[in-house]
């Protein structure tokens, strides 16, 4: 594959998320995209966040069931992380909710028609636009799957994720007998998002809609529509990228059991600061009376620095140094509370929540026990979690190392995140 960093030929990126289905196989009138995953997060908002975290989009169009556009908007925008990510997309980002139709194919065509009209109004060349189409009921799509699809569309013009089948597949006839023995190594189960050059998939859908109206023929998915009309695609083929069994579509009530599965990650954070006169002794966001304080580029709160590194490490988002380089004067005497809040906001936006933090602070003086509960409450307040998720232990250096000689303070933190 071509060097991915050098590919960027599509000036406009659009995303269509389908949420117009009737969810009849769920039973009991459940609209699967509206199912809560805890707090303000829904199946729909989790799916949308994966895309907004992975790429910069210009347009997001969500297809809605008849009469449910307002409700769909409320469910999506109730998630504060979605609102934050929409803001981060920039002032030119467009989000629209449009009514779908009686079939997935027609709903997507409605969305493509809407986008084509928007492109015309805004003088956007639709041959230089890319569109990703995703099932709103696939909330566990990963950023890696999305990025791989985008890169592959950039290079080849059409892509979708797929997973190899594990069971032997057979083609059967109308009388339920095997009519053909398929070669398993040549088969895969395709998923979404499916990505295309906008102008090509739009013309293919236009033709498919004509056939639907004349012959009452429905295509199975957008890759079949794309492959069916080579006159509009130049004969290009859809390239398969790596999918995942986790990128599951919620269809039946039993699929809700999958929602109960949590991913857990552990993070480790460590920090040490020299103690000098003329500085405040900060720990966990509170000032502790002492004749010395931490020497640092920022305000030196050793505990908050270690907590920040632990959280970023568990989420796989980097470390405090990559976020706030010490050589950058912008962070001179910066509040460690603000630094932690910024990083914690990104960790939460990636879908993580805190299970617990266990912290060890080593210093010869001052004694931390009288301040422990205040430190715990302060950290819990900064992270907006309950105090029982935080614990802080104080240790001395037994007069041995720099800590033991009263020259430094040290913090070690381990955290567990889940999503």
Image (cartoon, rainbow, N blue to C red):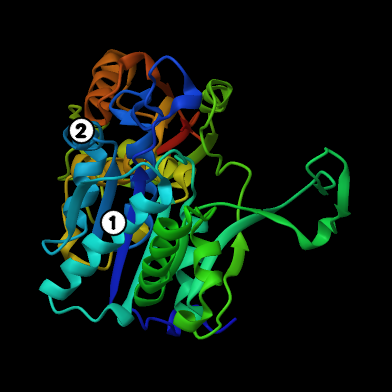
Q: Is residue 362 visible?
A: no
Residue at 32%, 44% in the rendered image: 101
Q: Which mark is residue 66?
A: none
**Horizontal and vertical percent position of residue 196:** 43, 70
- Local packing at callout 1 (Cα closer than 10 Å; few below 14, some 14-19, many 20+) is many
Q: Is residue 21 left or right of residue 383?
A: right
Q: Is residue 321 visible?
A: yes
- Say above or below: 95 vs 205: above
- Say above or below: 206 vs 418: below
Residue at 28%, 55% in the rendered image: 110
- Say above or below: 382 vs 204: above
**Horizontal and vertical percent position of residue 22:** 39, 31
**Distance from Cα at disc 1 to Cα at disc 2:** 16 Å
Tag 2 secondary structure: loop
Q: Quadrant of residue 224?
A: bottom right
Tag 1 secondary structure: helix
- Local packing at callout 2 (Cα closer than 10 Å; few below 14, some 14-19, many 20+) is few
Q: Which mark is residue 67?
A: 2
Observer-nearest of 348 and 84 = 84
Closer to the N terminus: mark 1 or mark 2?
2
**Horizontal and vertical percent position of residue 207:** 41, 69
On-image quarter of the N terminus: bottom right
Residue at the disc numbered 1: 111
Observer-nearest of 134 and 292 = 134
Residue at 26%, 53% in the rendered image: 61
Observer-nearest of 41 and 98 = 98
């Amino acid at each position: 594959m071509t060097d991915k960093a050098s590919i960027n030929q599509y000036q406009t990126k659009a995303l269509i998320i389908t949420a117009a289905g009737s969810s009849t196989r769920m039973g009991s009138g459940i609209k699967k995209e509206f199912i809560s995953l805890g707090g303000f997060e829904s199946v729909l908002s989790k799916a949308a966040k994966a895309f907004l975290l992975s790429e910069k989009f210009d347009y997001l169009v969500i297809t809605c069931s008849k009469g449910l556009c307002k409700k769909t908007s409320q469910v999506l925008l109730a998630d504060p992380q979605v609102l934050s990510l929409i803001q981060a997309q920039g002032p030119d980002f467009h989000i629209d909710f449009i009514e779908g139709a009686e079939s997935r194919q027609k709903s997507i065509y409605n969305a493509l028609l809407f986008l084509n009209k928007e492109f015309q109004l805004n003088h956007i060349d639709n041959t230089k636009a890319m569109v990703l189409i995703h099932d709103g009921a696939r909330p566990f799509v990963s950023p890696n799957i999305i990025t791989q699809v985008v890169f592959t569309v950039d290079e080849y013009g059409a892509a979708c994720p797929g997973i190899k089948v594990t069971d032997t597949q057979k083609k059967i006839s109308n009388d339920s007998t095997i009519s053909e023995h398929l070669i398993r190594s040549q088969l895969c189960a395709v998923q979404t998002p499916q990505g295309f050059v906008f102008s090509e998939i739009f013309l293919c859908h236009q033709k498919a809609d004509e056939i639907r109206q004349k012959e009452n023929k429905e295509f199975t998915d957008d890759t079949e529509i794309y492959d069916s009309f080579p006159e509009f695609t130049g004969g290009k083929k859809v390239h398969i990228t790596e999918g995942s069994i986790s990128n599951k579509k919620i269809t039946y009530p039993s699929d809700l059991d999958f929602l109960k599965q949590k991913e857990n990650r552990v993070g480790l954070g460590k920090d040490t600061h020299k103690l000098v006169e003329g500085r405040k002794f900060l720990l966990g966001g509170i000032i502790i009376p002492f004749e010395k304080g931490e020497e640092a580029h920022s305000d030196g709160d050793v505990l908050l620095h270690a907590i920040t590194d632990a959280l970023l490490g568990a989420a796989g988002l980097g470390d405090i140094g990559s976020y706030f380089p010490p050589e950058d004067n912008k962070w001179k005497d910066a509040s460690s509370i603000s630094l932690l809040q910024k990083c914690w906001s990104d960790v939460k936006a990636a879908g993580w929540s805190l299970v617990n933090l266990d912290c060890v602070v080593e210093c010869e003086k001052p004694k931390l026990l009288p301040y422990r509960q205040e430190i715990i409450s302060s950290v819990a307040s900064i992270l907006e979690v309950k105090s029982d998720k935080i614990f802080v232990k104080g240790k001395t250096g037994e007069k041995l190392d720099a800590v033991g000689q009263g020259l430094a303070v040290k913090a070690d933190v381990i955290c567990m995140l889940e999503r």
